[in-house]
Image (cartoon, rainbow, N blue to C red):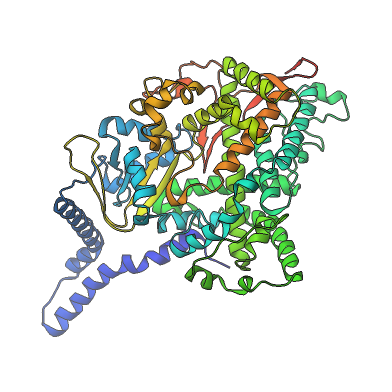
Amino acid sequence: MSLPPGIRYLLKLLPTLLTPPFTVYFAKWFAETYLNLQISRGLVASLCFFSLPIVFTARVQYSLYKDRRAAASHGAILPPTIPAWWGGIDLLIAAVKTQASQYPGEGLAILAKSLGNIYNLRILFKDMFFTFEPEHVKIILATEANSFEKGEDLRVIFQPLLGSGIFSVDGDLWKFHRAMTRPFFTRERFSDYELFDRHSLEAINVMKNRLREGHPIDFQDLVARFGLDSSSEFLFGKNPRTLTAGLPYPPNASSSSPSSSSPSSSSPSTSNTPSSSDRSNTFGHALDLAQHISIERGAAGALWPLTEFWRDRIAEPMRVVHEFLDPILSEAVSRREGAAADSDAEKSTDEHTKNEIKDRQVQEGETLVDHLLHYTQDRTILRDEILNISMAGRDTNACLLTFLVYMLTSHSNVQTKLREEILNTVGASRAPTPEDFRDMKYLRAVINETLRLYAPVAINFRSSTKPVLLPSMTPGGKPYYVPANTKVAYSVLVMHRRKDLWGPDALEWDPDRFIDERLHKYLTPNPFIFLPFNAGPRICLGQQFAYHEASFFLVRLLQSFSDIALAQSVAPVSPSPRHPSAEPDPLGWKQRERLPIRMHLTLYLKGGLWVKMTETDDNTVVD
């Protein structure tokens, strides 16, 4: 049985905490034994008590001096540092307090207004550089990607959730994951429209049934289920059928609701409501909880183990996640063991990480697990990999579709124009084809504009492996020096909302900016201002999968429904798009929202996205 995080953390710190006072006591013993000096106990006690802060302060000051000298030797400067008390402990406390309520990225953008688009947020005496400059992000992700990695701090925090999967590892192990996964993500496999169509139609039918009961739908919950079902079948041939496990009912639903009169339409207390005993629902809930815990750990920084001193909060949800995934792995491994073993499958993981892996042709009907078994049979690596990729397939697309429909509810003109393009290109009932998507420029613009204003992964991190210079964006200004082993954070959400990069209307959700003259004025000359899928060697493998799946679902949605609107009786805040927030809103971000936006690994709407809509085949408005 492993020790709780807090106890492990203190045990790890013991050598650091005890070395200075032990050194003082040893010096006292040496002086009295060999030098015949008498030292008072009071002095020794004082030196022992103050030795740790003295040594710690000396190390911090020396580190700062060394970094300043190194920057000067390169003709560079360090980014401006945010004033803070006692190594940034006040900033850490403030971050923990506001993490659950603040608009994602808002605090970072506010600091940028006074300090510039690169600054140093010093937390617990450790530097963390933040940048929102496209040129800097280009260097970090692409031109000098070999000088940056995910970093040990990130791995420690996310290891229980992500394990040794592709999103948390570096070096040879990352190359191994990337090489064995890349052949599966080909353009041909992204065009499996039969799979997209089947799951889209299932989602549409589930929506119709619930709307006909007289209840609105939590669209955010629905597309999370759709994403999990479709990505799971695409990746490892297993449909968890979360769509048919039962959608949640609105919080204000009661026995007097229209559903109570029909045995086929259950109230929240009946069997159609998601049950904790249902494996697919339980898996989804556990995965969400594990993500929330991981983000809370990240907000607490290096001290997070002290917030879980006696209990590892993530252990139970991850047990549920593993129990769901392990049978899928066992089934795939059994299939593999029953077939003739390929020579490459018998190599160990270590052997693969030492050698370049050649792409193999994915066979017809192979799942991702089947494909990965040709590279390794290490079940931990396999489980971590399918969890990483299936989580990305669910969460990023669910985020995209959620915020896109959220925007459609307040932009009826866009909703009308998009639906007209779909009906004129595809028709009212036919499934779309790749050629259709090439013709639907406005559909792609709507998706891109949503990814711009609501990038699913709002904030990301890297850690420098060696000193790097980031250019000043001020003509004639000195470059910025990034020391080795420094955490560097970048926020595409903040970058995507900069008016100097996107124009004075940068905060407006306007898909036409990806079609009209603004595209050529802003994005075409500087493509790194738009990075919803990252860039460089670690660019998202599932980028085209996301576009295809989201496009297909939207076509089926708008073929089946019109007049999508918020269900005002369920919405947690005022439906007015310009409702003044009670909180300060120096950026003008909050007043543009009708629902509260939060973030775990991806953005989400707190309380869900409860919508009503008109079913097009009978023109009946359902609320």
In this rendering, position of residue 135 left or right of residue 416: left
Residue nearest the viewer, comparing 137 with 5: 137
Vertical relation: 20 (above or below) 451: below
Residue situated in front as seen by the camera: 97 or 513: 513
Residue 567 quadrant: top right
Q: Is residue 566 visible?
A: no
Quadrant in the picture for the C terminus: top right
Question: Residue 338 location in percent, x, y?
Answer: 76, 70
Image quadrant for the N terminus? bottom right
In the rendered image, residue 238, in percent from the top left (x then y), is placed at: 73, 52
Q: Residue visible at 69% across and 21% down?
A: 423
Q: Is residue 258 above or below residue 155?
A: above
Q: Percent x, y for residue 325? A: 68, 56
Residue that lies at the very extreme toward the right in this rendered image: 263
Instruction: Using the image, determine if residue 587 lies above or below residue 83.
Output: above
Image x and y of residue 275, in percent: 75, 42
Whether residue 423 is visible here, answered yes or no, is yes
Identify which residue, 2 or 149, lies in the foreground.
149
Q: How many marks?
A: 0
Left or right position of 213 against 449: right
Side (left or right) of 176 relative to 88: right
Q: Tell me the residue at 36%/32% (across/down).
A: 525
